[in-house]
Amino acid sequence: AHLERIDGVDGAVHAFLHVAHDEALAFARGVDERRAAGDQLHPLAGVPVAVKDVVATRGLPTTAGSRLLEGWVPPYDATLVERLKAAGLVVLGKTNMDEFAMGSSTEHSAFGPTHNPWDLSRIPGGSGGGSAAAVAAFEAPLAIGTDTGGSIRQPAAVTGTVGVKPTYGGVSRYGLIALASSLDQAGPCTRTVLDAALLHEVIGGHDPRDSTSIDAPAPSAVEWARRADVKGVKVGVIRELGGEGYQAGVRQRFDEAVALLTDAGAEVVEVSCPHFEYALAAYYLILPSEASSNLAKFDAMRYGLRVLPEGVDAPTAEQVMAATRDAGFGDEAKRRIILGTYALSSGYYDAYYGQAQKVRTLIARDFEAAFQQADVLISPTAPTTAFKLGEKLDDPLAMYLNDVATIPANLAGVPGMSLPVGLAPENGLPVGVQLLAPATKDERLYGVGAALE
Ligand code: GLN
């Protein structure tokens, strides 16, 4: 049914870069046979899942939205894909994304943008717009995203879906094509909080192949989602997120969500995170620095594309690398590589990268102080509803501003969830609110999220 739905609508939505038609059917048949043979199967066995194209999948093309990796077929599965398959989930295909997960609209994909199923002239968010759109358009019931600065949560907000960024280290990064290794986290994109909980428990938990993986089991997300209880829970409204620059309908739905929590027995307090105003600036130094280093491996020798420079008889390795990177990377990737190498260069390192790391510490302290006063924090996920395709494409700063509310969680490593809270009255487009919890307390997101749903 999902493959038929993809055939029917993906021409217009373009959520998928690759549909694994035959592999999915063969795998699903295998699950059916095990069921028929009386095997004890996981509750999600046989349920299809779409996977963001930044995650390595054995035998399926994995491009990270870039020409540089066009045609690359990984010889191995990411740990999270191994876990999906072990639980019997059926990998439907690979979803579209901004190149190397850099962006907030999926317009930086080398293979054309994804369209928001609510209004095809609008963006589905980014970088994981494909995963969110696939779920919103009923092409897949579940999807996997990755969130380095909001790429699960912001697409969820603008497509009316649920997206969770787990605690840093909660889901293995083994087999993700790294953007910024100290910020990257994979997580679920779904239509309900309970679906996200089920998926989170499948992919979460310790993995010895990821050195930053937390040595603990996955959170009891399902149990908390089923309980859906906020009585006596302290919810902190973040003063610095939600004022000026936030669309009226976003603020209205946010205020209603807070009122709903109060009615359901939560205790709402206001908290202040004064350093959040520097989060965006710090992120856009730390991320390009790490990205420039991670993307150095695309040297035309090891993976993917190789372009020979024109008019050179016997090009040097360096000339081949330059020609390949020039042809293979899009503008946004180049912009961030230049920014990152500059910020890391000797003489500037302390002034830029070093300063940004200090800001990161201050933001982590803001969270610590806020979590003394509240069990979970709440804010709008994104300042606006889905904007028009092309609207911010030539204005990187305007594009970056979309991440203002989501980035602090990545800088501090804390978990976050975006869930839908209705439509903005002015344009009828979905609005999301964000819940944040202390590191390793992901289950709280599910308890409060399910109560708000
Ligand atoms: N929009 C952010 C960026 O462009 C988010 C990236 C992400 O989470 N992968 O960096």
Image: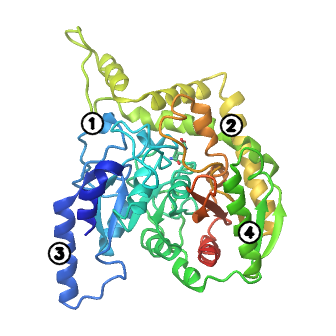
Farthest residue, direction bottom: 38
Name the secondary structure under disc 1.
loop
Q: Does mark 2's beta carbon lie closer than 8 Å to ligand 1?
A: no
Residue drawn at x 36%, y 78% is 44
Check the image and report above or below for 138 versus 337.
below
Check the image and report above or below for 62 versus 446.
above
User: Which amino acid type is marked by label 3?
Assistant: Arg
Residue drawn at x 61%, y 46% is 403
User: Which amino acid type is marked by label 1?
Assistant: Gly
Check the image and report above or below for 208 versus 357.
below
Q: Check disc 4: other Cα within 10 Å, few if <14, some if 14-19, many if 20+.
A: many
Q: Does mark 3's beta carbon lie closer than 8 Å to ligand 1?
A: no
Residue highlighted by disc 1 = 304
Q: CA distance from mark 3 to mark 4?
A: 45 Å
Front one among 13 and 44: 13
> In x, y percent, where is residue 333?
46, 32
Q: CA distance from mark 1 to mark 2?
A: 33 Å
Front one among 6 and 288: 6
> In x, y percent, where is residue 347?
66, 21
Do the residues bearing badges 2 and 4 touch, measured as CB atoms within 8 Å?
Answer: no
Q: CA distance from mark 1 to mark 4?
A: 48 Å
Q: Check disc 2: other Cα within 10 Å, few if <14, some if 14-19, many if 20+.
A: some
Q: CA distance from mark 2 to mark 4?
A: 29 Å
> In x, y percent, where is residue 283?
63, 41
- The disc, 1 or 2, on the residue closer to the chain's N-terminal end is 2
Location of residue 450 (image quadrant): bottom right
- The disc, 1 or 4, on the residue closer to the chain's N-terminal end is 4
